[in-house]
Amino acid sequence: MTSVTPRGFETRVLRIPLVAPFETSFGRQDEREVILVRAVTAGAEGWGECVTMPMPLYSSEHTEGAWDVLHRFLYPALLGVGPVNPRHVAARVEHIVGHRMTKAAVELALLDASLRERDESLAGYLGADRTHVPSGVSVGIMPSLDDLLATVQDYLDQGYARIKIKIRPGWDVEPTRLLRRTFGDDLLLQVDANAAYTLSDARLLRQLDDLGLLLIEQPLAEDDLVQHATLATQLQTPICLDESIVSAKVAADAITLGATQVINVKAGRVGGYLEAVRIHDVARAHGVPVWCGGMLETGIGRAANAALAALPGFTLPGDISASDRFYAQDVTDPFVLDEGRIAVPTGPGLGVDVNPERLEAVTVRRSWTPAAGHEADPVPTA
Ligand code: NPQ
Ligand code: MG
Protein backbone atom coordinates (compact mmCIF):
# COMPACT_ATOMS: atom_id res chain seq x y z
CA MET A 1 0.00 0.00 0.00
CA THR A 2 1.43 3.36 -1.09
CA SER A 3 1.62 6.13 1.51
CA VAL A 4 -0.15 9.40 0.76
CA THR A 5 0.41 12.90 2.08
CA PRO A 6 -2.93 14.53 2.82
CA ARG A 7 -3.07 18.27 2.05
CA GLY A 8 -6.41 18.56 3.70
CA PHE A 9 -9.80 17.03 4.37
CA GLU A 10 -13.15 18.27 3.19
CA THR A 11 -16.09 17.28 5.40
CA ARG A 12 -19.72 17.46 4.34
CA VAL A 13 -22.94 16.65 6.14
CA LEU A 14 -25.51 15.49 3.59
CA ARG A 15 -29.24 15.11 3.96
CA ILE A 16 -30.83 12.91 1.32
CA PRO A 17 -34.57 12.14 1.31
CA LEU A 18 -35.55 8.45 1.48
CA VAL A 19 -37.98 7.13 -1.14
CA ALA A 20 -40.09 5.82 1.78
CA PRO A 21 -39.79 6.01 5.56
CA PHE A 22 -37.57 3.27 7.05
CA GLU A 23 -38.74 2.03 10.46
CA THR A 24 -36.78 -0.23 12.80
CA SER A 25 -37.14 -1.24 16.43
CA PHE A 26 -35.22 1.93 17.42
CA GLY A 27 -37.06 4.49 15.32
CA ARG A 28 -38.29 5.80 12.00
CA GLN A 29 -36.19 7.73 9.46
CA ASP A 30 -37.50 9.88 6.58
CA GLU A 31 -34.12 11.07 5.34
CA ARG A 32 -30.52 9.97 5.54
CA GLU A 33 -28.18 12.37 7.28
CA VAL A 34 -24.64 11.21 6.60
CA ILE A 35 -21.08 12.60 6.51
CA LEU A 36 -18.75 12.31 3.52
CA VAL A 37 -15.01 12.86 3.93
CA ARG A 38 -12.79 13.84 1.01
CA ALA A 39 -9.03 13.44 1.42
CA VAL A 40 -7.00 15.61 -0.97
CA THR A 41 -3.49 14.27 -1.55
CA ALA A 42 -0.67 15.32 -3.84
CA GLY A 43 -1.67 12.88 -6.56
CA ALA A 44 -5.35 12.16 -6.05
CA GLU A 45 -8.38 12.58 -3.89
CA GLY A 46 -10.28 9.90 -2.04
CA TRP A 47 -13.71 9.57 -0.50
CA GLY A 48 -14.97 7.99 2.68
CA GLU A 49 -18.44 7.72 4.21
CA CYS A 50 -19.22 8.07 7.90
CA VAL A 51 -22.38 6.02 8.50
CA THR A 52 -23.44 7.65 11.76
CA MET A 53 -27.07 8.66 12.23
CA PRO A 54 -28.23 12.03 13.65
CA MET A 55 -29.05 10.35 16.96
CA PRO A 56 -27.14 7.59 18.79
CA LEU A 57 -29.88 4.93 18.40
CA TYR A 58 -28.17 2.15 16.45
CA SER A 59 -24.84 2.68 18.23
CA SER A 60 -23.28 5.29 20.51
CA GLU A 61 -22.06 7.44 17.58
CA HIS A 62 -23.99 10.28 15.93
CA THR A 63 -23.44 13.00 13.31
CA GLU A 64 -22.49 15.91 15.56
CA GLY A 65 -20.14 13.73 17.59
CA ALA A 66 -18.49 12.43 14.43
CA TRP A 67 -18.08 15.99 13.09
CA ASP A 68 -16.39 17.02 16.34
CA VAL A 69 -14.10 13.97 16.50
CA LEU A 70 -13.06 14.37 12.86
CA HIS A 71 -12.05 18.03 13.26
CA ARG A 72 -10.58 18.02 16.76
CA PHE A 73 -8.92 14.59 16.95
CA LEU A 74 -8.66 12.59 13.71
CA TYR A 75 -7.60 15.25 11.16
CA PRO A 76 -4.92 16.70 13.49
CA ALA A 77 -3.48 13.18 13.93
CA LEU A 78 -3.15 12.75 10.17
CA LEU A 79 -2.29 16.23 8.81
CA GLY A 80 1.20 17.73 8.76
CA VAL A 81 2.78 14.45 9.89
CA GLY A 82 4.28 13.49 6.52
CA PRO A 83 3.27 10.52 4.38
CA VAL A 84 0.58 8.27 5.85
CA ASN A 85 0.15 4.64 4.91
CA PRO A 86 -3.60 3.88 4.92
CA ARG A 87 -2.79 0.57 6.65
CA HIS A 88 -1.43 2.59 9.60
CA VAL A 89 -4.36 5.00 10.04
CA ALA A 90 -6.04 2.80 12.66
CA ALA A 91 -2.85 2.69 14.76
CA ARG A 92 -2.41 6.47 14.48
CA VAL A 93 -5.85 7.09 15.96
CA GLU A 94 -5.92 4.16 18.37
CA HIS A 95 -5.50 6.49 21.37
CA ILE A 96 -8.95 7.89 20.58
CA VAL A 97 -11.36 5.46 22.23
CA GLY A 98 -14.28 4.21 20.16
CA HIS A 99 -15.69 6.40 17.34
CA ARG A 100 -15.21 3.53 14.94
CA MET A 101 -17.59 4.79 12.23
CA THR A 102 -15.76 8.12 12.23
CA LYS A 103 -12.35 6.46 11.99
CA ALA A 104 -13.60 4.18 9.22
CA ALA A 105 -14.57 7.18 7.08
CA VAL A 106 -11.11 8.75 7.28
CA GLU A 107 -9.36 5.43 6.66
CA LEU A 108 -11.52 4.80 3.58
CA ALA A 109 -10.84 8.28 2.17
CA LEU A 110 -7.07 7.75 2.44
CA LEU A 111 -7.32 4.18 1.15
CA ASP A 112 -9.31 5.41 -1.85
CA ALA A 113 -6.79 8.19 -2.55
CA SER A 114 -3.86 5.79 -2.30
CA LEU A 115 -5.48 3.16 -4.54
CA ARG A 116 -6.42 5.81 -7.13
CA GLU A 117 -2.80 7.00 -7.15
CA ARG A 118 -1.75 3.38 -7.88
CA ASP A 119 -4.61 2.69 -10.29
CA GLU A 120 -5.76 -0.31 -8.25
CA SER A 121 -9.36 -1.22 -7.34
CA LEU A 122 -10.49 -1.48 -3.71
CA ALA A 123 -12.10 -4.85 -4.51
CA GLY A 124 -8.82 -6.22 -5.85
CA TYR A 125 -6.88 -4.80 -2.92
CA LEU A 126 -9.22 -6.30 -0.30
CA GLY A 127 -9.13 -9.73 -1.97
CA ALA A 128 -12.40 -9.94 -3.91
CA ASP A 129 -12.78 -12.97 -6.14
CA ARG A 130 -16.17 -12.22 -7.77
CA THR A 131 -17.48 -9.68 -10.26
CA HIS A 132 -21.04 -9.58 -8.85
CA VAL A 133 -22.61 -10.06 -5.42
CA PRO A 134 -26.17 -11.26 -4.68
CA SER A 135 -28.37 -8.44 -3.47
CA GLY A 136 -30.64 -8.69 -0.46
CA VAL A 137 -33.08 -6.08 0.79
CA SER A 138 -33.93 -4.93 4.31
CA VAL A 139 -37.65 -4.26 4.77
CA GLY A 140 -38.71 -1.88 7.54
CA ILE A 141 -41.56 -2.31 10.00
CA MET A 142 -44.73 -1.56 8.05
CA PRO A 143 -48.03 0.11 9.00
CA SER A 144 -49.92 -3.11 8.20
CA LEU A 145 -49.47 -6.72 7.10
CA ASP A 146 -50.98 -5.80 3.71
CA ASP A 147 -48.32 -3.12 3.24
CA LEU A 148 -45.66 -5.67 4.13
CA LEU A 149 -46.94 -8.21 1.58
CA ALA A 150 -47.16 -5.61 -1.18
CA THR A 151 -43.69 -4.26 -0.42
CA VAL A 152 -42.05 -7.70 -0.34
CA GLN A 153 -43.87 -8.72 -3.55
CA ASP A 154 -42.47 -5.62 -5.24
CA TYR A 155 -38.90 -6.38 -4.13
CA LEU A 156 -39.23 -9.99 -5.31
CA ASP A 157 -40.52 -8.77 -8.68
CA GLN A 158 -37.41 -6.59 -8.92
CA GLY A 159 -35.30 -9.72 -8.42
CA TYR A 160 -33.90 -9.32 -4.90
CA ALA A 161 -32.21 -12.56 -3.84
CA ARG A 162 -33.10 -12.42 -0.15
CA ILE A 163 -35.60 -10.65 2.13
CA LYS A 164 -34.85 -9.42 5.65
CA ILE A 165 -37.60 -7.92 7.75
CA LYS A 166 -37.16 -5.75 10.78
CA ILE A 167 -38.91 -7.09 13.89
CA ARG A 168 -39.74 -5.78 17.36
CA PRO A 169 -42.08 -6.91 20.15
CA GLY A 170 -45.57 -6.79 18.62
CA TRP A 171 -44.26 -7.14 15.03
CA ASP A 172 -42.41 -10.44 14.90
CA VAL A 173 -43.94 -13.94 14.63
CA GLU A 174 -47.10 -12.91 12.74
CA PRO A 175 -45.48 -10.96 9.87
CA THR A 176 -42.69 -13.52 9.53
CA ARG A 177 -45.13 -16.45 9.40
CA LEU A 178 -47.28 -14.58 6.88
CA LEU A 179 -44.29 -14.07 4.57
CA ARG A 180 -43.32 -17.73 4.80
CA ARG A 181 -46.89 -18.87 4.04
CA THR A 182 -47.37 -16.38 1.21
CA PHE A 183 -44.08 -16.74 -0.61
CA GLY A 184 -43.25 -20.39 0.13
CA ASP A 185 -40.37 -22.37 1.54
CA ASP A 186 -37.86 -21.35 -1.14
CA LEU A 187 -37.84 -17.67 -0.13
CA LEU A 188 -34.52 -16.74 1.49
CA LEU A 189 -35.85 -15.00 4.61
CA GLN A 190 -34.28 -13.60 7.78
CA VAL A 191 -35.24 -11.19 10.56
CA ASP A 192 -33.41 -8.35 12.35
CA ALA A 193 -34.45 -7.26 15.86
CA ASN A 194 -31.86 -4.48 16.36
CA ALA A 195 -31.47 -5.50 20.01
CA ALA A 196 -35.19 -5.19 20.85
CA TYR A 197 -35.52 -8.33 23.06
CA THR A 198 -34.15 -9.79 26.26
CA LEU A 199 -33.32 -13.35 27.20
CA SER A 200 -36.73 -13.65 28.89
CA ASP A 201 -38.26 -13.47 25.38
CA ALA A 202 -36.66 -16.81 24.46
CA ARG A 203 -40.03 -18.60 24.39
CA LEU A 204 -41.44 -16.06 21.97
CA LEU A 205 -38.34 -16.16 19.77
CA ARG A 206 -38.60 -19.96 19.65
CA GLN A 207 -41.85 -19.53 17.72
CA LEU A 208 -39.67 -18.36 14.81
CA ASP A 209 -37.84 -21.69 14.81
CA ASP A 210 -40.21 -23.55 12.48
CA LEU A 211 -40.27 -20.78 9.86
CA GLY A 212 -37.04 -21.82 8.10
CA LEU A 213 -35.21 -18.55 8.64
CA LEU A 214 -31.61 -18.15 7.47
CA LEU A 215 -30.86 -16.39 10.77
CA ILE A 216 -32.12 -14.06 13.46
CA GLU A 217 -30.04 -10.88 13.64
CA GLN A 218 -29.10 -9.18 16.93
CA PRO A 219 -32.05 -10.27 19.10
CA LEU A 220 -30.50 -8.96 22.37
CA ALA A 221 -28.49 -5.93 23.48
CA GLU A 222 -25.10 -4.95 22.10
CA ASP A 223 -23.22 -6.03 25.23
CA ASP A 224 -25.24 -9.25 25.79
CA LEU A 225 -22.62 -11.67 24.41
CA VAL A 226 -23.13 -14.25 27.14
CA GLN A 227 -26.92 -13.99 26.93
CA HIS A 228 -26.73 -14.51 23.15
CA ALA A 229 -24.71 -17.68 23.80
CA THR A 230 -27.40 -18.86 26.22
CA LEU A 231 -30.17 -17.99 23.76
CA ALA A 232 -28.34 -19.92 21.03
CA THR A 233 -28.71 -23.12 23.08
CA GLN A 234 -32.49 -22.54 23.14
CA LEU A 235 -32.97 -21.80 19.41
CA GLN A 236 -32.50 -23.82 16.25
CA THR A 237 -32.32 -20.71 14.06
CA PRO A 238 -28.73 -19.42 13.77
CA ILE A 239 -28.03 -16.19 15.65
CA CYS A 240 -26.24 -13.51 13.63
CA LEU A 241 -24.71 -10.64 15.59
CA ASP A 242 -24.56 -7.13 14.14
CA GLU A 243 -24.35 -4.36 16.79
CA SER A 244 -22.31 -6.58 19.17
CA ILE A 245 -19.44 -7.21 16.74
CA VAL A 246 -17.35 -4.04 17.03
CA SER A 247 -13.92 -5.56 16.27
CA ALA A 248 -12.17 -8.72 15.09
CA LYS A 249 -11.34 -9.39 18.75
CA VAL A 250 -15.01 -9.33 19.76
CA ALA A 251 -15.84 -11.45 16.71
CA ALA A 252 -13.38 -14.10 17.86
CA ASP A 253 -14.77 -13.95 21.41
CA ALA A 254 -18.38 -14.23 20.19
CA ILE A 255 -17.57 -17.23 17.99
CA THR A 256 -15.70 -18.96 20.81
CA LEU A 257 -18.55 -18.29 23.25
CA GLY A 258 -21.14 -19.68 20.85
CA ALA A 259 -22.91 -16.32 20.83
CA THR A 260 -22.96 -16.02 17.02
CA GLN A 261 -23.30 -18.64 14.29
CA VAL A 262 -23.21 -16.07 11.44
CA ILE A 263 -21.72 -12.55 11.36
CA ASN A 264 -23.04 -9.36 9.77
CA VAL A 265 -19.94 -7.37 8.74
CA LYS A 266 -20.26 -3.59 8.56
CA ALA A 267 -17.04 -1.66 8.05
CA GLY A 268 -18.26 1.43 9.90
CA ARG A 269 -19.29 -0.51 12.99
CA VAL A 270 -15.83 -2.12 13.27
CA GLY A 271 -13.63 0.89 12.47
CA GLY A 272 -12.93 0.36 8.78
CA TYR A 273 -12.70 -1.94 5.78
CA LEU A 274 -9.32 -3.34 6.86
CA GLU A 275 -10.73 -4.48 10.22
CA ALA A 276 -13.78 -5.81 8.33
CA VAL A 277 -11.46 -8.03 6.27
CA ARG A 278 -9.89 -9.31 9.50
CA ILE A 279 -13.37 -10.27 10.76
CA HIS A 280 -13.99 -12.06 7.46
CA ASP A 281 -10.70 -13.91 7.95
CA VAL A 282 -11.34 -14.91 11.56
CA ALA A 283 -14.89 -16.06 10.77
CA ARG A 284 -13.73 -18.02 7.72
CA ALA A 285 -11.07 -19.78 9.77
CA HIS A 286 -13.84 -20.91 12.12
CA GLY A 287 -16.24 -21.90 9.33
CA VAL A 288 -18.62 -19.08 10.30
CA PRO A 289 -20.44 -17.54 7.31
CA VAL A 290 -20.47 -13.75 6.98
CA TRP A 291 -22.49 -11.28 4.93
CA CYS A 292 -22.20 -7.55 4.32
CA GLY A 293 -24.61 -5.35 6.25
CA GLY A 294 -25.82 -1.93 5.19
CA MET A 295 -26.27 1.51 6.75
CA LEU A 296 -28.27 3.21 3.97
CA GLU A 297 -25.01 4.21 2.31
CA THR A 298 -24.66 6.66 -0.54
CA GLY A 299 -22.91 5.39 -3.66
CA ILE A 300 -19.56 5.94 -1.89
CA GLY A 301 -20.19 3.50 0.96
CA ARG A 302 -22.22 1.22 -1.31
CA ALA A 303 -19.24 0.86 -3.71
CA ALA A 304 -16.95 -0.06 -0.83
CA ASN A 305 -19.51 -2.54 0.53
CA ALA A 306 -19.80 -4.24 -2.86
CA ALA A 307 -16.01 -4.63 -2.95
CA LEU A 308 -15.97 -6.14 0.56
CA ALA A 309 -18.91 -8.46 -0.14
CA ALA A 310 -17.00 -9.98 -3.08
CA LEU A 311 -14.51 -11.67 -0.72
CA PRO A 312 -14.81 -15.47 -0.65
CA GLY A 313 -16.13 -15.80 2.93
CA PHE A 314 -19.20 -13.66 2.17
CA THR A 315 -21.37 -16.70 1.44
CA LEU A 316 -24.78 -15.20 2.30
CA PRO A 317 -26.53 -12.39 0.37
CA GLY A 318 -25.89 -9.00 1.95
CA ASP A 319 -27.94 -5.86 2.54
CA ILE A 320 -26.38 -4.22 -0.54
CA SER A 321 -29.52 -3.19 -2.40
CA ALA A 322 -29.84 -1.11 -5.54
CA SER A 323 -29.49 2.62 -4.81
CA ASP A 324 -33.17 3.22 -5.65
CA ARG A 325 -34.26 1.06 -2.70
CA PHE A 326 -33.45 4.13 -0.58
CA TYR A 327 -32.72 7.10 -2.85
CA ALA A 328 -34.34 8.68 -5.91
CA GLN A 329 -31.14 10.72 -6.35
CA ASP A 330 -27.74 9.57 -5.10
CA VAL A 331 -24.43 11.46 -5.19
CA THR A 332 -22.91 8.87 -7.57
CA ASP A 333 -24.39 7.04 -10.53
CA PRO A 334 -26.87 4.58 -9.03
CA PHE A 335 -26.13 0.92 -8.37
CA VAL A 336 -28.72 -1.17 -10.20
CA LEU A 337 -29.89 -4.77 -9.93
CA ASP A 338 -28.59 -7.20 -12.55
CA GLU A 339 -30.54 -10.45 -12.14
CA GLY A 340 -30.69 -9.94 -8.39
CA ARG A 341 -27.02 -8.99 -8.17
CA ILE A 342 -24.92 -5.85 -7.83
CA ALA A 343 -21.82 -5.43 -10.00
CA VAL A 344 -18.59 -4.89 -8.07
CA PRO A 345 -16.86 -1.70 -9.29
CA THR A 346 -13.60 -2.37 -11.12
CA GLY A 347 -12.15 1.13 -11.56
CA PRO A 348 -9.34 2.61 -9.41
CA GLY A 349 -10.14 2.97 -5.71
CA LEU A 350 -13.86 2.87 -5.02
CA GLY A 351 -14.47 2.86 -8.77
CA VAL A 352 -17.27 5.43 -8.56
CA ASP A 353 -17.27 9.21 -8.94
CA VAL A 354 -19.19 11.84 -7.05
CA ASN A 355 -21.42 14.08 -9.12
CA PRO A 356 -20.52 17.62 -7.92
CA GLU A 357 -23.95 19.13 -8.64
CA ARG A 358 -25.85 16.37 -6.87
CA LEU A 359 -23.40 16.53 -3.98
CA GLU A 360 -23.88 20.28 -3.64
CA ALA A 361 -27.67 19.91 -3.77
CA VAL A 362 -27.76 17.64 -0.69
CA THR A 363 -24.98 19.30 1.36
CA VAL A 364 -26.19 21.05 4.52
CA ARG A 365 -22.78 21.74 6.11
CA ARG A 366 -19.23 21.84 4.76
CA SER A 367 -15.71 22.47 6.00
CA TRP A 368 -12.17 22.39 4.61
CA THR A 369 -9.36 21.46 7.01
CA PRO A 370 -5.90 22.09 5.47
CA ALA A 371 -2.63 20.53 6.58
CA ALA A 372 -0.40 22.70 8.77
CA GLY A 373 1.78 24.75 6.45
CA HIS A 374 -0.82 24.45 3.66
CA GLU A 375 -3.24 27.05 4.98
CA ALA A 376 -2.54 29.18 1.93
CA ASP A 377 -3.46 26.39 -0.51
CA PRO A 378 -6.47 27.23 -2.60
CA VAL A 379 -9.58 25.78 -0.99
CA PRO A 380 -10.95 23.12 -3.32
CA THR A 381 -14.53 23.82 -4.29
CA ALA A 382 -15.52 20.51 -5.88
C1 NPQ B 1 -29.13 -3.01 10.42
N1 NPQ B 1 -29.56 -1.52 8.47
O1 NPQ B 1 -28.76 -3.96 9.79
C2 NPQ B 1 -29.25 -1.63 9.82
C3 NPQ B 1 -29.58 -0.59 10.77
C4 NPQ B 1 -30.06 0.73 10.34
C5 NPQ B 1 -30.21 -1.82 6.19
O2 NPQ B 1 -31.29 -2.85 7.96
C6 NPQ B 1 -30.77 5.47 8.89
C7 NPQ B 1 -29.44 5.22 8.75
C8 NPQ B 1 -31.60 4.48 9.33
C9 NPQ B 1 -28.90 3.98 9.07
C10 NPQ B 1 -31.91 2.22 10.12
C11 NPQ B 1 -30.41 -2.12 7.63
C12 NPQ B 1 -31.09 3.23 9.67
C13 NPQ B 1 -29.72 2.97 9.53
C14 NPQ B 1 -31.39 0.99 10.44
C15 NPQ B 1 -29.24 1.71 9.87
O3 NPQ B 1 -29.36 -3.17 11.60
MG1 MG C 1 -28.83 -5.24 11.82
Image: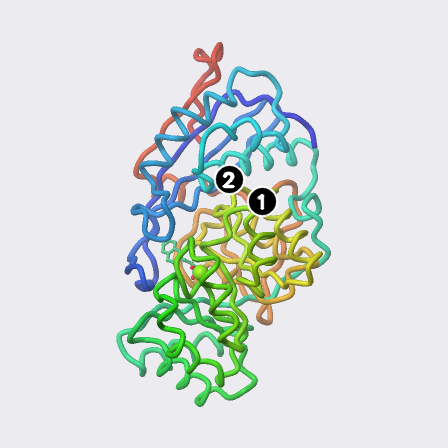
Quadrant in the picture for residue 41:
top right
Residue marked by disc 1: 273
Residue marked by disc 2: 104
Q: Which one is in front, 176 or 297?
A: 176
Q: Position of residue 261 (x, y in %)?
A: 58, 65
Please tell me how many numbered marks the rendered image carries.
Answer: 2
Q: Which one is in front, 133 or 201?
A: 201
Which residue is painted at 56% across and 16% down in the image?
Answer: 81
Question: Relative to residue 182, is residue 64 drawn left or right?
Answer: left
Q: Is residue 203 above or below residue 299?
A: below
Q: Which one is in front, 286 or 183?
A: 286
Q: Is residue 292 above or below residue 6?
A: below
Q: Secondary structure at mark 2?
A: helix
Q: Position of residue 272 (x, y in %)?
A: 54, 42
The CA span between labels 2 and 1 is 7 Å
Quadrant of the rendering where the N terminus is positioned: top right
Mark 1 surroundings: few (<14), some (14-19) or many (≥20) residues within 10 A: many
Mark 2 surroundings: few (<14), some (14-19) or many (≥20) residues within 10 A: many
Circle 2: residue type: Ala
Ligand 1, by image quadrant, is bottom left
Quadrant in the picture for residue 375:
top left
Circle 1: residue type: Tyr
Mark 2–mark 1 CB contact (< 8 Å)? yes
Quadrant of the rendering where the C terminus is positioned: top left
